[in-house]
Amino acid sequence: MTTALVSVLGAAVLIAALMVFIRRRLSRAMEEVTLVYPEYSRLLTAPMANFFGLRSAGMKQVRGNGILLLTADRLYFRMLLPRRELTIPLDAVTSAGTVGSFLGRTKGRDLLEVDFTDEGGSEDSAAWLVGDLQEWVNGIRRSANLS
């Protein structure tokens, strides 16, 4: 076998192993999230939302995929790797809309941006790439009683 063929096969095996790892990680995370937020309590669920970060954490933070949920009283995000959680009470949300980029990063599609007041009383915002973007914007606005 040639070196190129061995390299291609090695890369394919590595990608397949990574896909299996991510699927298992997502499955376990969804099981954990479902214990706290049963399906009946969720208004919207994005099982593979791409988190663009918190404005307050700056540009050098790690972006990642995870589970984004909207319930009657909060927006909850559980990042898969590294494991990180963000809970935003809906009464702290000041606006929800779309942006083309966040913290200088883009995916070429509009993002969900949520502005909120953090526990310390400071203004902050977070952004995600989600499917059904307008459904998320409308759901958050409606649930947070925003115009």
Image (cartoon, rainbow, N blue to C red):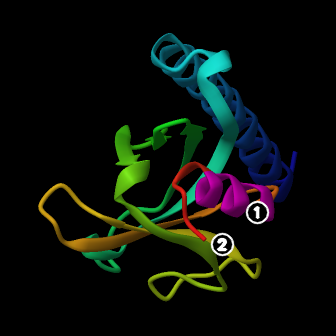
Q: Secondary structure at mark 1?
A: helix
Q: Which mark is residue 111?
A: 2
Q: Amino acid at mark 2?
A: Leu
Q: What residue is shown at x 78% (from left), y 64% (from top)? A: 134
Q: Quadrant location of residue 142?
A: bottom right
Q: Mark 2 or mark 1, which is nearer the start of the sequence? A: 2
**Which residue occupies 60% across, 22% down?**
41
As drawn, 26 above or below 1: above
Part of the protein shown in magenta: 134-142
Q: Which label number is shown at residue 133?
A: 1
Residue 11 vs 55, above or below: the answer is: above
Is residue 83 toward the left or the right of residue 146 in the image?
left
Q: Please report contact status of discs 1 and 2: CB closer than 8 Å, yes or no.
A: yes
**Place of residue 3 in the rendered image (x, y in percent of width and height, measured from the top left):** 78, 55
Residue 52 part of the magenta-drawn span: no
Residue drawn at 56 percent across, 16 percent down: 34
Left or right of 136, for residue 36: left
Residue farthest along the left direction in this orientation? 120
What amino acid type should be assigned to the residue bearing mark 1? Answer: Leu
